[in-house]
Image (cartoon, rainbow, N blue to C red):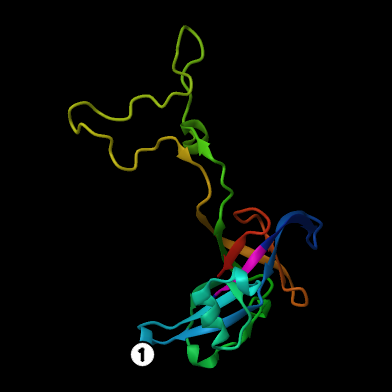
Amino acid sequence: MVLGLLGTKVGMTHVFDKVGNVLPVTIIKAGPCFVTQIKTLEVDGYNALQLAYGEVLSKNCKKPQYGHLTKIGLPPLRYSREYKVDNPSTFELGQEVSNDIFSVGQKIKVSAKSIGKGFAGNQKRHNFARGPMTHGSKNHRAPGSIGAGTTPGRVLVGKKMAGQLGNRMVSISNLEIFKINPEQNLLVVKGSIPGKPGNLVSIQ
């Protein structure tokens, strides 16, 4: 069994369950993906499949990737990821993998790049408290002291300071599949997933 699939976030909506509760859900266009490389324990040291997704024009496909795909008779595909499998011998190059590998009620992990929010201060980025606003205080949103004195005489690595917020890979586990539409390659997942609509997502 393939333990993962690539897809695109379509957006969010809400649905009603059998009892009548309103559930927020995210719709993902999952697949179809194509097997572009089979890695085995004997040759590569581990069992995995390389899957490619997202058909594009040949000019928008990187040349090494384009050559890799044309060797096995596939169209230009933009994205590729590896997923570990137990028995890679059951797959063949060029094979199509769609969302029928999942089932309703199954728990999945979704990874995607979060929305970039630009340069942010400590209050917004790390949930720091602000300084007093009255009695002549001039420290409202300043970071304050960032280290000790002579010892160690430097700012320690990993200090929480202002910087870029978002635009990083985020994974959310234990999301439940609410509905599957195999005709349109859609997965309806309970809850929210990282990123904007149109983002590439990895489902495991």
Q: Quadrant of residue 191?
A: bottom right
* Residue 4 appears anywhere in the view: yes
In the displayed structure, does residue 151 sit left or right of residue 177?
left
Q: Could you tell me which residue is drawn at 60 percent across and 81 percent down?
A: 34
Q: Quadrant of the C terminus?
A: bottom right
Rendered location of residue 68, percent (x, y): 51, 82
Residue 68 versus residue 113 in the image, above or below = below
Disc 1: CA contacts within 10 A as few (<14), some (14-19) or many (>=20):
few
Q: Could you tell me which residue is drawn at 50 percent across and 31 percent down?
A: 123
| Between 139 and 80, the one nearer to me in the picture | 80
Residue 5 versus residue 133 in the image, above or below = below
| Between 68 and 81, the one nearer to me in the picture | 68
* Residue 1 appears anywhere in the view: no
Magenta segment range?
4-8
Q: Could you tell me which residue is drawn at 51 percent across and 72 percent down?
A: 81
The residue singled out by tag 1 in the image is: 42
In the displayed structure, does residue 46 sit left or right of residue 32?
left
Type of residue at label 1? Glu
